[in-house]
Amino acid sequence: MTYTFFITLEVVISILLILVVLMQASKGGGLAGSFGGANIGTVFGVRRTSDFLSKTTTVLATLFILLALFINLTVLPRGEDKESVIQQQTVPPPATQLPTQPAPTQNQPK
């Protein structure tokens, strides 16, 4: 239950982080104009908008990293008898080799 909650929270934070980064205007205008991010400057003002988006990006990125570490260290299901996905894969037996037959000799005239 808690594992699912934290993974869902991580996905929501990652989606918000993607949206905030895309809304920031780059030197060339970026994708902000395509998604309506160009109009957000009229609400807060251009300078305050860039500060807001920059701080939001920093907070979301920090939350993303800290939550990922938290999930990995404490919430991730563990077990001593469990194997990793790589270890669970069975190695196929080696292919049986066909018996080698000598190449037929051609009778060459002497």
Image (cartoon, rainbow, N blue to C red):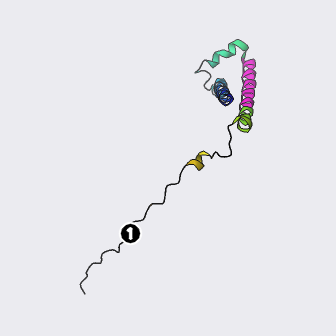
Q: Residue furthest top?
A: 43
Q: In this view, does 29 lie to the left or right of 70?
A: left
Per the image, the residue denoted by label 1 is: 99
- Quarter of the figure with residue 47: top right
- Dot 1, crowdedness within 10 Å: few (<14), some or many (≥20)? few
Which quarter of the rendering shows the C terminus? bottom left
Q: Which of 82 and 29 is in front in this view?
A: 82
Q: Nearer the viewer, residue 69 or 43?
A: 69
Q: Residue furthest left?
A: 109
Residue appearing at x 68%, y 42% in the figure:
79
Q: Which residue lies furthest to the bottom in this view?
A: 110
Rendered view: 58 above or below 98: above
- Quarter of the figure with residue 73: top right
What stretch of residues is rendered in magenta?
Answer: 46-64
Q: In this view, does 28 lie to the left or right of 110?
A: right
Q: In this view, does 45 lie to the left or right of 98?
A: right
Q: Which of 60 and 25 is in front in this view?
A: 60
Residue 90 placed where, x, y %? 53, 51
Label the magenta part by its dominant secondary structure. helix
Give the structural element (helix, strand or loop) at label 1: loop
Residue 28 placed where, x, y %? 63, 28
What's the amino acid at mark 1? Answer: Pro
The mark tally for this picture is 1
